[in-house]
Amino acid sequence: MNIDNIELDQVRQARSEIQGLDIDVYGLIKRFGDRQVLHGLDLAIAPGEFVAIVGRSGCGKSTLLRLLAGLDGESAGEIRLDGRPAAAHKEDVRMMFQDARLLPWRTVIQNIAIGLTGSRQEVRERALEVLARVGLADRADEWPARLSGGQRQRVALARALIHKPRLLLLDEPLGALDALTRIEMQRLIESIWKQQQFTALLVTHDVSEAVALGDRIVLVEEGRITLDESVALVRPREHGEPAFARLESRVLKRLMTIEAVTSRNQIRGRVADIVLDDVLSEVRIETPAGVVTSTVLTRSLSEQPLEIGAEVLATFKSNEVVLAAA
Amino acid sequence: MADTAFPIAGAVPGGRLAALFRHLGRRLVPWLVPLAILVVWEVAARVGWLSSRVLPEPLAVVKAGVALAASGELLQHVRVSAGRAFTGFAIGGGLGLLLGLLTGSFRKVEIALDTTLQMIRNIPPLALIPLVILWFGIDETAKLFLIALGVFFSVYINTFHGIRSVDPALIEMGRSYGLKGWSLYREIILPGALSSILVGVRYGLGFMWVILIVAETISAQAGIGYMTMNAREFLQTDVVLLGIVLYALLGKLADVAARQLERRWLKWNAAYTAA
């Protein structure tokens, strides 16, 4: 009996050691009718990596997720999951939506068991196991209508986890929750991700959520990636920590700068020269339209890795030129 | 409202009794008016204000019912009528459900069939009576045909609409979790359409009795309609009235049964469990 249990645990252990999917996206283009949503997007994600995608609504981040999930087809370009097309990995990819999308006519545990095969007893046991992991074991036989928003998302998370996904796509799953529940859920998602080591891709509006969870933060703007930054903070990350706050405000500022302007007053270029001074430095940028000079605080030069030859996006404001990595 | 206005009512001795009376009152009040009407009617008949040829006294109706029940005639008529109604309902409702599922699920079937069905829907089934008599004569088939036709459309339209209004987000979720074909149908589409289908069933049941009554007055050798038409010949107003009451009771019974189904199958939906 003892041996059986140990063996069973070993089997479970082996099962839970899932290798995350490797994602490669090249020149991805998606059109809906006349409207082009993704403009040749490139993205590479290593197995087991947690990438947070931020961007304002309509920038194409959800579309990217739907293409990865195989819910829509790409217009051009290529998606490779472990070197194979997305359609070949439908079983390995699970998605959490902004609304939990639980079936109201099925109990919590029946919702989790959706799409599973096997004997009723076995399915129930497995479902109870994941339900316990999201902390809802005692609500197994309730109707979803009786649960709170946060609990519904927990059930949706359990429903995704029971399939042992190698890639978990999270399309703003915490957007509708209150601040406290959201932080709780972030912790839960992080701990399960650590344990199961799947690749995770989180789309969010909330920069602090992106900083809390992402190994990398990717900013998508008008169907392109305009910022791709690694987060070097130690997990679990505390929202109040200075390093956390600094990074959050930097990404936020970057997001706001982009949101404040349109592409009409932006120009792409390359850093040609940097003239250092004690307080203010000058950065000269070669653009197709000629050389542009931007005055930057020397202190913030070290924050943004500006070096000669780097691709930048120069934004013209009424009285200054703002630079951003391109 | 009263409970919140007097929160200490429960603590007062006798408060529970008061609550019981309130509860009983709420149950009884709706029946006061019908009861009063029956009493006035009974009295009016006894005093002689109402001729028994216009309306027999309620007691006479009850007596007629008891006498017919004792002879076994009543049960026979009810059985024939109910059998007729439900056979027609099964045929019409079954076809309506099947075609509604098909046109709701497959765009091609909808294009091929829906326009035709919508055109036929606009013909009142009772307008077809002369034609139906020419086709099937005046025996059972004609009655079943009319009932089936009447029931068909309410089930068909509500099934079609129910399937079409299933939340596409849920269908997408099901697909992304590997459901397709029959399993997608069983898990998501059918349960999603069920409340609408049951509305169609309830409407269909209501329609079923109306058409049954008309069909049975055309001609019949048995059934409640036959019983009342026969009684009319002999000026037995009490039996005529009994027939009307029986129709009402059967209609109510069918509706209660349909509500029970709703409560059972839609118990996940707070709107149906609270009632």
Image: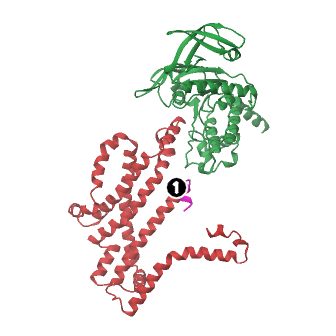
Q: Is B256 above or below relative to A144?
A: below
| Residue A49 visible in the snapshot | no
Shown in green, the chain is A
Q: Quadrant of the N terminus of chain A?
A: top right
Residue A117 x/y as whole percent: 58, 39
Q: Nearer the viewer, residue A120 or B118?
A: B118
Question: Which residue is identified by label 1?
Answer: B265
Q: Is B224 above or below relative to A188?
A: below
How many marks on residues? 1
Residue at the image point whose x is 27% and y is 53% from the top = B120
Residue closest to the far left: B134
Q: Quadrant of the C terminus of chain A?
A: top right
Color of chain B here? red
Q: Is B125 above or below relative to B107?
A: below
Q: Quadrant of residue B61?
A: bottom left
Residue B153 x/y as whole percent: 34, 55
Q: Nearer the viewer, residue A23 or B1?
A: B1
Q: Is residue B272 magenta?
A: yes
Q: Which residues are magenta?
A: B265-275
Residue A202 x/y as whole percent: 61, 30
Element type where label 1 sits in the image = helix
- Residue type pointed to by label 1: Trp
